[in-house]
Amino acid sequence: MLIDSHCHLDFPYLSEQIDDVLGRARAAGIGVLVTISTRVRDFATVRAIAEAHDDVYCTVGTHPHNAAEELDVTLDELIALARHPKVVGIGEAGLDYHYDNSPRADQARSFRLHIAAARETGLPLVIHTREADEDTASILEEETGKGAFPFVLHCFTAGRGLAERGLALGGYVSFSGVVTFKNAEELRAFFDYAAGLGIDGLMVSPGYSYAKAPDQEHFLQRERTKALFRKVFAGKKWDFNHSPFFLDFLQGKREYQCTPWGNPNYSVLGWQKPCYLMADGYATTFQELMAETAWDKYGTGRDPRCADCMVHCGYEATAVVDAMSSPAKAAKSVWATFVR
Ligand code: SF4
Ligand SMILES: [Zn+2]
Ligand SMILES: [Zn+2]
């Protein structure tokens, strides 16, 4: 199941069309959404959205932009609000020195209050940090010294030092859609960086202009995708959670037809036919999905919507089946995975 762990459904342009927004999220295979609070004083709105929808959960907290407005929020108040059954995290709180919308001392005070709430409740703290690496790291280290608390450095764009210090404290780092790359060199540099952080098992999948993508203009088509991955993987290896044959496929060294049921997608609407990128109806049970979907109608060359698809969820399963199809291929796959 896919979880959108960070959205702001209370922001006006989303809340005005909340049913459409949730409908699109569900159709795209999102099973759960966590809407993130940015003002404790507006928490009632966030909580109401979570209460109204079974698949929406929320956090409670003050965004660093709003820290100066909410200095009167007490620890007891924050903890009491966090006890609501739909609250799954504290925040987002932290330090944003890019905008400096609140004085830095206020941001730090609010950040520490949220850390105390995370420590007390055991709920993970969603940390927003921008251009404040040193102060974020030293506050996290100092506060962890008083007692550990779970946290995620969300939507990470900071330097390697903060990532390493956060990971050393037992935290998580999320690299999200803001991590995009202009060319193969940038992608290679990112793989080096992530591997250096000790991330075991990177995954990579090319996007493409699937029917529901809001922006059809900026995706690479199939041939350009292959050319990009040929450059990315030239002479270099990283520790990927992929079949080596899928990585060959990305580079155009193997031709595969997709296996749309290889990564089935279940949401509140049911089992999505045929894959998470296309919603040609839903089945109530997995057996029904398998029995009633016209599988041979899908895939590159069969359905125009599939023409440029090279995604992991469709093609990894084919690569894995291929790797097991003969002793020679299995040996080659094991060799490429474990012997470097
Ligand atoms: S090629 Fe396969 S995985 Fe890709 S959109 Fe088509 S059916 Fe889905
Ligand atoms: Zn946010
Ligand atoms: Zn943020």
Image (cartoon, rainbow, N blue to C red):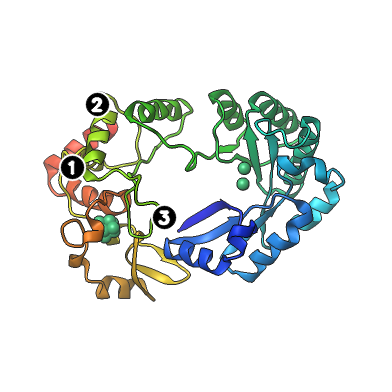
**Residue 55 x %, y %:** 56, 65
Q: Amino acid at mark 2?
A: Ala
Question: What number is the disc on residue 330?
Answer: 1
Residue linked to disc 3: 214
- Label 2, label 3: how many angstroms apart (C-alpha)? 32 Å
What quarter of the picture does the N terminus occupy? Answer: bottom left
Foreground of the two, 267 or 209: 209
Amino acid type at image mark 3: Pro
Q: In the image, which disc is placed on residue 183? A: none
**Rendered position, 89 above or below 245:** below
Q: CA distance from mark 1 to mark 2?
A: 23 Å
- Quadrant position of residue 219: top left
Q: Amino acid at mark 1?
A: Ala
- Seen from the viewer's position, the closer of residues 305 and 153 is 305
Neighbor class of circle 1 (other Cα within 10 Å; few <14, some 14-19, many 20+) is some
Label 3: which secondary element: loop
Dots 2 and 3: beta carbons under 8 Å?
Answer: no
Q: From the image, tell me which residue sits under label 2.
A: 234
Q: Are marks 1 and 3 in contact (CB under 8 Å)?
A: no
Q: Position of residue 303 (x, y in %)?
A: 20, 62
Depth check, mark 1 against mark 3: the one in front is 3
Tell me the quarter of the picture where residue 54 sits: bottom right
Quarter of the rendered structure image containing ligand 3: top right
- Which one is earlier in the sequence, the residue at label 2 or at label 3? 3
* Number of numbered callouts drawn: 3
327 sits left or right of 178 in the view: left
Q: Nearer the viewer, residue 200 or 22?
A: 22
Labels 1 and 3: the sequence-earlier one: 3
The residue depicted at 43 percent of the width and 65 percent of the height is 27
Image point (71%, 33%), residue name: 100
Look at 22% across and 67% down and name the residue there.
295
